[in-house]
Image (cartoon, rainbow, N blue to C red):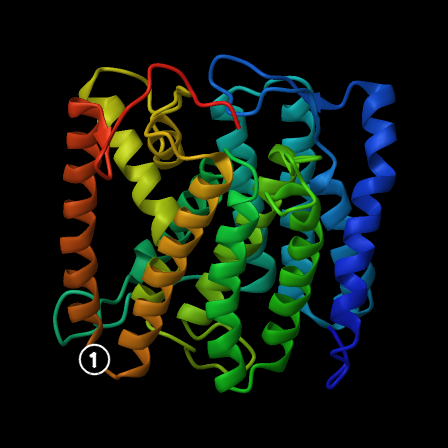
Amino acid sequence: MMPENAWWILPLVVLLTAGLCLVLIPLARRTGWHDHPGERRVHESVTPLTGGPAMLIAFAVVLAGSLPQNRFLQGLAAGGLLLFLTGLFDDRRHIPAPVRFLLQIVACAIMIHWADVRLDDFDQLFTGSVLSLGWLSVPITVFCALGVINAFNLIDGMDGLGGSILLVAAAGMALFAGMEGLQQMLSLLLVLMASVLGFLLLNARFPWNRKARLFMGNSGSMMLGFILAWCFIALGNDHNESGQRAFMPMTAVWLFAVPLLDTTTQIWRRWRAGLSPFDADQKHLHHAFLRAGYSTGEAWLNITLLAAVLGGFGVLLDISGLPEYLSFWIFLAFAFGYYFYIRHSWEKQRFLGRSFLYNEPKT
């Protein structure tokens, strides 16, 4: 892990990731390693998919020295590398959804077996009593991890969005890791955030980027989703260096609220329409912003702010000491409100007081 008090490493990780992103772009041009515009895409030009490899290399350079003595990091490296390679192949030649899920399950099994990380309970999720999972611990752990991995992959559909969502979630977890004195987990999360920030310097709609210069690709989104999932699980239960949970399991839901709400809404809508939940379309939250006339930069900023507000609210609920079941019922009420508003928006072709455009706006 990052040596204690060696915060100077973090700016170097940012610069290293950004530099690797730039260095790998010519390779993408020579090999055809691009994402092409299409009917279900937001971008309008061929874009390199080198963000994932750049973040992996930067992440590995800093953390490789800690692998021999850290089983959590070993499992994270093995499972994350498997999903990175899965996504890398999927970026070039489409992998069927069942095969992707199978490989994701294998990666999760590595974490559970090798690192001994899993969900033993959901704390006081529904009432004042602890909801123990018993023999369902492993399958529910895998289900939750798959949910985070695939929700993160689906939310990464617009310039800057996936990276910004990760920063919000990782920042919340880093806060709790710091408060609980979990130095190893804190170092891991800070290095993760630094590598993603280096990528965002070339991916998000900052003044120096008229459009994204590169994407993270499925290689990056599956790898990052995997890391997020297992950090949530380790900190939300007692399978971490302190042996005590750092936050309520529901706090992880708040920190990851936007991808979860967007994904579950889309799956439910597709199921009601008799469609496969794995079919791609243009009815995600960011598509609603774009169809309502917001620019890509405005949509990115608004969704990131929404994620930060919801994550911050979940952090406040946790720190205040309120029972977890109150956090659960508040989130459930918000989720229903979100679903009905989004459904109403697509039915009425209006979002946030603006009528939908017939075509995606030029940005």
x 57%, y 55%: residue: 227
Amino acid marked by disc 1? Leu
Where is residue 325 shown, x and y percent of the image?
17, 69
Q: Is residue 34 left or right of residue 324?
A: right
Q: Nearer the viewer, residue 119 or 57?
A: 57
Q: Is residue 114 left or right of residue 112?
A: right
Q: Is residue 273 left or right of residue 38?
A: left
x 54%, y 59%: residue: 167
Which quarter shows the N terminus?
bottom right
- Look at the picture and state if 262 lies above or below 93: below
x 44%, y 75%: residue: 238
x 87%, y 20%: residue: 30
Q: Residues within 10 Å of mark 1 (few under 14, many from 20)?
A: few
Where is residue 169 shown, x and y percent of the image?
47, 60
Q: Nearer the viewer, residue 99 or 165?
A: 165
Asked if residue 28 shows in the view, the reply is: yes
Residue 321 figure quarter: bottom left
Where is residue 150 shown, x and y percent of the image?
46, 39
Q: Which residue matches tag 1?
A: 322
**How many numbered marks have been drawn onto this rendered protein structure?**
1
Q: Is residue 304 left or right of residue 220?
A: left
Where is residue 282 shown, x and y percent of the image?
38, 22
Q: Nearer the viewer, residue 107 or 60?
A: 60
Asked if residue 109 shows in the view, the reply is: no
For mark 1, give the secondary structure.
loop
- Look at the picture and state if 229 lies above or below 6: above
